[in-house]
Image (cartoon, rainbow, N blue to C red):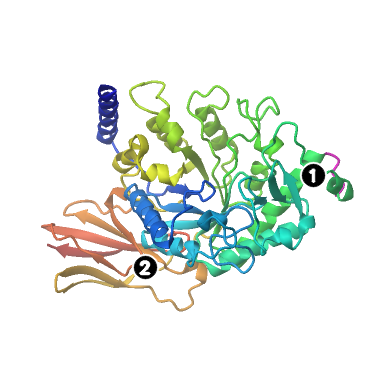
Amino acid sequence: MKLFNKACLLLILMFVCAVAAAKVNNPKREFRGAWIQAVNGQFLGMGEKEMKNYLTNMLDELKKANVNAIIFQVRVEGDALYRSANEPWSRYLTGVQGKNPGWDPLEFMVAQAHARSMELHAWINPYRAKTKGTRALAELHQINRHPERFIGYDSQLFFNPSLQANRDWICHIVKDIVTRYDVDGLHIDDYFYPYPVGGVAFNDDEYFRRDSRGIANKGDWRRDNVNRLIYQMHKTVRETKPWVKFGVSPFGIYRNVASTPSGSDTKGLQSYDDLYADVLHWVNNGWVDYCIPQVYWEIGHTAADYETLVKWWAEKASNRPLYIGQDVNRTVRAADLKNSSRHQQPAKFDLQRSLPAVQGSCLWDAASAAKNVGQFRRVLEQYYHSTPALMPKYKFIDNKAPKKVRGIKRITTGNDDLLVWLTPNKEKTKALDKVVSYVVYCFEKGEKVDIENPSNIVAITSDNYYSLPKDKSGKCTYVVTTLDRLQNESKGKKIKVKF
């Protein structure tokens, strides 16, 4: 067994070295996200200090791989992982719904992500009101105020999607989060109507009869219910803070070709037919700002081939930024079909990078990536994410570049050798165009100044200074640019530095 383990380790190391030795040509702009979930119970049993340490260690490891967006679950079942006057504290923090943990995880994560130049997207489950493992619901939970608005299904509880009162409540929650927290995105996943259980009906016949809105087919009616929520949520986010992105992460199969000629060549559960989520309708109507289909299968999967699905999404869902949801554990367990000595991470990333419509990926789950299972994170560090990346552009929200920095200069105080600069004049600056961070580039003597090459980025920071390295010699040209809330980038301001 020891010999086997050593052989496996040797293969992994050879694989990492081979990937790291390959030529790096990373994009300057790419979404590199990671999901941090609560619903798996990973925080249960942790006190405030332990959970904070756990989360900061995870963020530090992800930062090494230049992950630039964290999607943090803050509403699992009509509850809250943040201070809320509307819904009870989540049992996924303390084990008891409604019990105050004594601190605010969302507030903490916003600050910690931004300190590492990462975006923080607040992830909510809109319809789910009780999971199977929840035995008691707190007094503040909506079921105790409006029991008529819920439907039970397979030992779970759901906000009835057909009721406008529930859509209004969900959007009230969204507005509260976006208003009170400096989040960069509001995110929902693949849970719309519940995943079907054989022989168990979702009992909404009465509501269909009562208010079909002239829609003859119940499936179409259910999809219209979800469509109405998505439209209203997007409108709520945009009106509250126009720079906050509204994103969705649907199930990886939209429709199979057996259901429609335009479907993917797959044979699995369908987002459109089984969960009543018409994702392409939202994308094509501009009701979401980004889409991350959960393409968690391996290349060569008989029912849901990864390559088939990624190419399908790239062709059909390019009207809004498209990122691919990657399952870290499944990826490292699957052998590359062309080279059995390595797993499928390189093949998957090479595929997504080959498709212009795909502008990044998101890792399921963050903890597995941070733990470096199968050397996944290390390969990102050394190759696919070896240079920092700005966010893809959201031109349909805003495409105006912010103003340049002012008064850049070098100062030396004690042991500190710094570049410092002033924020552009804030007068008459709209909130959407506010400068929130800076990019620092470094070019060696004789090197062409090219800020489109991400290998020249030495820092992305919210600070008005950059600590110059102590081990450099010769002359360098530094360029500093500004970024607004949507990471539109200004022109650069240059300064030459002699070490």
Which of 245/440 is in front?
245
Q: Is residue 356 visible?
A: no
Q: Is residue 168 left or right of residue 457?
A: right
Left or right of 454 in this view: 271: right
On whether residue 215 falls in the magenta region, the answer is yes
Q: What's under tag 1, amino acid-wise?
A: Trp
Q: Is residue 260 above or below residue 460?
A: above
Q: On the rendered structure, is 401 left or right of 203?
A: left
For the point 36% across and 68% down, the residue is 404
Q: CA distance from mark 1 to mark 2?
A: 51 Å
- Label 1: how many Cα within 10 Å (few below 14, some 14–19, many 20+): some
Please report the bounds of the magenta region as a residue range: 213-217
Q: Is residue 370 magenta?
A: no
Mark positioned earlier in the residue sequence (1 or 2): 1
**To which residue does mark 2 refer?**
404
Q: Position of residue 401 (x, y in %)?
A: 44, 63
Q: Position of residue 345 (x, y in %)?
A: 39, 33
Q: Is residue 162 left or right of residue 61?
A: right
The correct choice, above or below, for 420 with respect to 38 in the image is below
Say which amino acid is labelled 2: Lys
Q: Quadrant of the C terminus?
A: bottom left
Q: Is residue 107 above or below residue 456?
A: below
Residue at 32%, 54% in the rendered image: 451
Residue 320 in picture, x, y percent from top left = 57, 47
